[in-house]
Amino acid sequence: MSEAVSATERGWTTGVAPGILPFFGNAIALLRRPLDFLESLPARGDLVEIRLGPRRAWVVCDPELVHRILKDPGTFDKGGPLYDRLRGLMGDGLVTCPHDAHRRQRRLLQPAFSPARVAACTGLMAAEAASVCRSWRPGQRVDVTAAMIALTTGVTSRLLFSDSLDAGRAAAVRSCLAVVVAGLFVRTVVPVDALFRVPTPGNRRYRSAVLRLHALVDALVAERRRGAPRDDLLGTLLAATRAGGGAGDGQGDAPLTEREVRDQLVTLLLTGVESTAMCLASVFALLADHPEAQRPLTEELDAVLDGRSVPGPEELARLVRTRAVVTETLRLRPPGWLFTRLTTRATDLGGHRLPRGATVLYSPYLLHHRDESFPEPDRFRPERWLPGGPAAAGTGGALLPFAAGSRKCIGDTFAMTEAVAAVTVVARRWRLRAPSGPVGRPRPAATLGPRSLILIPEPRAHLPGRASGPRAEGTRTGLPHTGLPHTGLPRTGQPRTGLPTAGDDV
């Protein structure tokens, strides 16, 4: 059935966003009130025309149309302002590469994210989670965002580099990623290259952060080449640079180039550290704002862990409410909240003819806040994802925190496992409360999540087998052996990130 016939049967509607300004288009509204602006668009139609600077673009507001885009990557390829900017950072890594290069790259990286490998990483995930909260004290003001970035940096770096990323370089990676994430958003909504070539302090910070991140990764690769082989993702990539290495499956793929090795490492660093950290920070922000959701969560943790400090793969599988808390957070506050695609040919979408090279946007945040898919979409209701709950039976494909189709996030299972393990370890020890008033909704940058979330930990003193105070309990975690060397990351639990807002960049 053709797209045009489907559009007639469905009765798609199209419209134009209000408030288009000369030169800036809708960029001012996107920068000032991005979430409100997106939520206003479905009233204009299923496919709504906007302006990103002087460029025309179309926002897809209906989940069925979004799935058509994601299931047809040959027509709706990775491109548009977001990926134009990301390629300056990631090159043509797995996230940003064009459709015709994707299959080769995914085959190479897929074994690192197999169910067996993810299960084997549960111990290191729990170990990193325990380490970031071990030094917390009752009543202390803790930068939870910074702690979660330290946690995900530790997990991701061990997956990629084993123990090669020492404390100093881990801090440098976090600093670079903070600047890059803040700068990407404004470069996406105002895609005017000349504006970002002006040597303003923000532009200089951004370029310096990109160059420094590339230099850090290049140094790690050079050191590994001089040392012994390791069974980590860097080792897999280096093996694939040799003749016949390809995807490691005998299918004749060309060897990876040195640039491709760096592109993949930078891609996995950015996506593995930033997105999961923002998800975890949002989990604890929402729990602080909704204490009624904490009691059933901690009751489940106490029952399933039964005196253990940390979960193994078997326990994680039984933590259905904990997983529901993470899933509801991904619905309410998806870290990846806005994406772009570029049409490779003229095509019909929602009854509208799009030319070749058209920019198309979709927003998981917008889809996740539609009343038609999720009743009371602005409420934090983890129970909707419990077995038998209203969302567990299906949401019409509206839940898309990891995309869909052949370009679905390769690390979706890894990220969910890491998030559930981290929430389990932290919530097992502490309740986190806001120092004053609700935390509220975060302001998005390239990702969505609280940039500097300050919470106060209160110990769960009734835990079985707990010694006197959090310090004593934290030194006897009973952490399983991970089989992987340690990163040497700082154990303060609250390194400073200095995260700027998107508006600070230019």
Image (tube, rainbow, N blue to C red):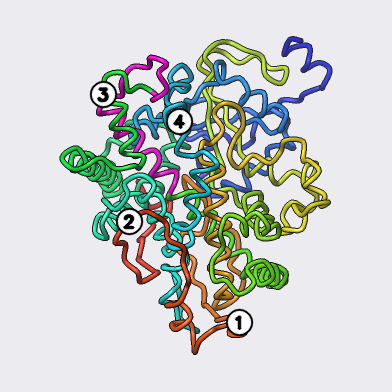
Does the stretch in magenta take in 257? yes
Whether pointer 2 and pointer 4 mark residues with C-beta atoms closer than 8 Å, the reply is no
Which element type, helix, strand or loop, lies under badge 3?
loop
The residues tagged by marks 3 and 4 sit, at their Cα atoms, a distance apart of 34 Å
> How far, Cα to Cα, is label 2 from label 3?
26 Å
Q: Which residue is mark 2?
A: 485
Label 4 amino acid? Pro
Which is more N-terminal, label 4 or label 1?
Answer: 4
| Above-or-below relation of 277 to 10 | below
Between discs 2 and 3, the one toward the N terminus: 3
Going from N to C along the chain, the mark reached first, 1 or 3, is: 3
Q: Give coordinates of residue 427: x percent, y percent.
A: 58, 70
Is label 3 in contact with label 4 (beta carbons under 8 Å)? Answer: no
Label 3 sits on residue: 242
**Which residue type carries mark 3?**
Arg
Relative to the observer, which residue lies in front, 147 or 353? Answer: 147
Q: Residue at x 62, y 68 (%)?
A: 305
CA neighbours of label 3 inside 10 A, class few (<14), some (14 to 19), many (20+): few
Give the label on residue 81, or none: 4
Q: Secondary structure at mark 1?
A: loop
Q: Circle 1 sits on which residue?
A: 464
Disc 1 marks a residue whose amino acid type is Pro
Q: Nearer the viewer, residue 480 or 503?
A: 480
| Segment tinted magenta in the rendering | 247-272
Q: Nearer the viewer, residue 229 or 443?
A: 229
* Discs 1, 4 touching: Cβ within 8 Å: no
* Res 112 quadrant in image: top left
| Residue type pointed to by label 2 | Pro
Query: In the image, is 482 to the left or to the right of 341?
Result: left
Task: Work out whether mark 2 precedes mark 1 in sequence or the reverse, and give the earlier one.
Answer: 1
Mark 4, secondary structure of its residue: helix
